[in-house]
Image: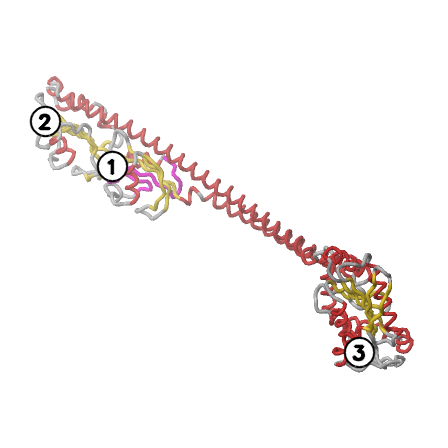
């Protein structure tokens, strides 16, 4: 006897469809919850990452703001020190200019004259000397010697600017190399005038740039920071870190100097033209002197501690976020397995274990639902009551295991004959099956019934006790046109009576009938006559 087992995938798909119709969206249940957990984990991880990024950015801005405040304070300290000292130097030059106008001082011996004119200013630290130059630029009085040293400085800018301009005031020169020895100098000069206002010479004070170097060395700007004093014409006076070639170097064409010239003070970020280090600059133009003070802290110094902290905390946060996502994925997988198991249990609870068709519980729900829909929409509803002929004799002859195999094979054939997703096949009980066919007329149901009968005949399952020698089925049809059946049990009873008549008519046949509601009279009509053309294509039916 052939042992053709059913394709459970096709049957299970139909049962799942019926479950969806019953309001149990298995696919959504299997995916919505687990996916929501994963999405929630990802969103939580992203939220943590965003919050950390915001906090990190704010911490960076705080570090930059602290550096700017520090640079501003350092610049003010340096500015006030330089202004105070240059004010003292200016007062010393003015005292010399006023002393020269007093005849009693100029009548003193050279040594006393030098002591009175220069007082102790000429011995100040970082002072290279003080000189009085006559109208031709020659040294007239020398703070360092009773006998003035020889030299003419009429070509120096600090000389001819006073000669040409009576209103030059206190002039601060660019760094220059001293002709009297001692290296680079910065000149502070003031005009001397005769009583009639004509040019009488210049009093000059030479300052060593080491003053600025020592001042800047005492200001903390970080290992890679820099502080510079630049003239408003772009000539550098001093820079820390110190380089002997810095004094007198022009940076007028550098991008940083363009910022200095654009405002009285401000902040900006740029790369140094001297050492190529990127720094954050604060600059300030002196209000009374031709200087620009610039304090620059390097990115590596400002953000070094912040960057190390960011890497450590970022690594911890990244691991935490990753762990959160992994945990969400694991929870999702666990939930998906649990939901799949639950759905399978629900499916098993609503599926016949032997045949894979819907069980009696799902059949009752489906039939009730479709009957109500048919009543509501006034559309047709048909059912097929299918009974395996002489099945008890089959079991007695071949055994219950063979009987189970035969039922499963017949169930598979029934399921394979259904074409529409809404059609449902169920095991009614024992060797009886029932199909629910929404929006199907009795004639269409008869065609389907013949297809099922033929499919079972073609299985050619041996059945010696049967008149036909093979397993066959009898089919009863009941239908409700326009929803006139008042209760679903009435429809089942009509189909049961039809299949009973089919068995009484010799089995392996189809019987359909309708109930007249007014007379409560049943008219049995052999459905085989309505499907003669279809039946002729199948094997001939034997009559008892």
Residue 405 shows in the view:
no
In the image, which is nearer the foreground, mark 1 or mark 2?
A: 1
- The image quarter containing residue 4 is bottom right
Disc 1 element: loop
Is residue 258 located in the magenta-colored stretch of the structure?
no
Dot 1 corresponds to which residue? 232
Label 3: few (<14), some (14–19) or many (≥20) C-alpha neighbours in 10 Å: many
Dot 3 corresponds to which residue? 457
Earlier sequence position, callout 3 versus callout 1 = 1
* 160 left or right, relative to 305: left
- Residue 272: horizontal and vertical position, in percent? 33, 45
- Residue 69: horizontal and vertical position, in percent? 40, 34
Dot 2 corresponds to which residue? 200
Depth order, front residue of 222/373: 373
Depth order, front residue of 224/408: 408
Earlier sequence position, callout 1 versus callout 2 = 2
In the image, which is nearer the foreground, mark 2 or mark 3?
A: 3
Q: Which stretch did the figure color magenta? A: 219-242
Disc 2 element: strand
Depth order, front residue of 484/257: 484
* 184 left or right, relative to 313: left
Is residue 230 located in the magenta-colored stretch of the structure?
yes
- Residue 302: horizontal and vertical position, in percent? 43, 41
In the image, which is nearer the foreground, mark 3 or mark 1?
A: 3
Residue 397 higher or lower than 42, as above or below: below
Residue 178 higher or lower than 487, as above or below: above
């Amino acid at each position: 006897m052939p042992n053709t087992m059913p394709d459970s995938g096709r049957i299970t798909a139909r049962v799942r469809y019926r479950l969806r119709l019953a309001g149990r969206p298995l696919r959504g249940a299997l995916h919505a919850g687990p996916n929501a957990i994963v999405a929630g984990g990802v969103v939580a991880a992203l939220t943590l990452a965003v919050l950390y990024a915001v906090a990190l950015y704010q911490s960076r801005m705080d570090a930059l703001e602290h550096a700017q405040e520090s640079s501003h304070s350092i610049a003010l300290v340096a500015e006030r020190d330089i202004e105070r000292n240059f004010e003292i130097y200016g007062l010393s030059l003015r005292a010399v200019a006023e002393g020269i106008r007093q005849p009693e001082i100029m009548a003193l011996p050279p040594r006393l004259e030098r002591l009175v004119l220069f007082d102790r200013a000429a011995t100040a630290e970082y002072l290279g000397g003080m000189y009085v130059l006559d109208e031709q630029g020659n040294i007239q009085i020398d703070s360092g010697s009773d006998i003035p040293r020889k030299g003419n400085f009429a070509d120096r800018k600090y000389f001819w600017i006073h000669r040409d301009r009576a209103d030059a005031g206190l002039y601060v020169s660019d760094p220059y190399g001293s002709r009297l020895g001692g290296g680079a100098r910065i000149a502070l000069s003031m005009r001397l005038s005769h009583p009639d206002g004509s040019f009488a010479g210049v009093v000059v004070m030479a300052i060593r740039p080491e003053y600025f170097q020592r001042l800047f060395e005492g200001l903390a700007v970080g290992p890679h920071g820099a502080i510079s004093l630049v003239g408003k014409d772009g000539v550098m006076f001093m820079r820390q870190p110190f380089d002997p070639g810095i004094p007198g170097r022009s940076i007028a064409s550098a991008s940083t100097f363009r910022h200095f010239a654009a405002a009285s003070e401000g902040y900006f970020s740029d790369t140094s033209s001297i050492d190529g280090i990127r720094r954050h600059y604060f600059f300030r133009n002196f209000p009374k002197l031709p200087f620009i003070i610039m304090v620059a802290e390097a990115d590596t110094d400002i953000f070094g501690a912040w960057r190390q902290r960011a890497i450590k905390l970022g690594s911890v946060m990244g691991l935490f976020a990753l762990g959160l996502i992994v945990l969400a994925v694991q929870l999702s997988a666990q939930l998906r397995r649990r939901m799949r198991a639950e759905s399978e249990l629900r499916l098993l609870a609503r599926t016949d274990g032997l045949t894979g068709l819907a069980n009696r519980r799902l059949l009752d729900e489906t039939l009730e639902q479709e009957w109500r829909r048919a009543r509501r929409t006034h559309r047709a509803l048909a059912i097929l009551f299918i009974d395996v002929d002489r099945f008890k004799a089959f079991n007695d002859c071949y055994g219950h295991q063979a009987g189970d195999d035969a039922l499963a094979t017949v169930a598979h054939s029934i399921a394979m004959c259904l074409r529409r997703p809404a059609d449902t096949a169920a095991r009614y009980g024992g060797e009886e099956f029932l199909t629910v066919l929404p929006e199907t007329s009795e004639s269409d149901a008869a065609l389907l019934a013949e297809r099922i009968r033929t499919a079972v005949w073609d299985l050619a399952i041996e059945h010696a006790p049967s008149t036909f020698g093979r397993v066959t089925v009898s089919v009863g049809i009941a239908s409700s046109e326009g929803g006139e059946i008042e209760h679903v049990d009435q429809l089942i009873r009509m189909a049961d009576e039809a299949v009973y008549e089919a068995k009484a008519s010799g089995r392996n046949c189809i019987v359909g009938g309708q109930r007249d509601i007014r007379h409560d009279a049943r008219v049995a009509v052999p459905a085989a006559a309505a499907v003669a053309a279809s039946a002729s294509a199948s094997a001939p039916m034997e009559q008892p």
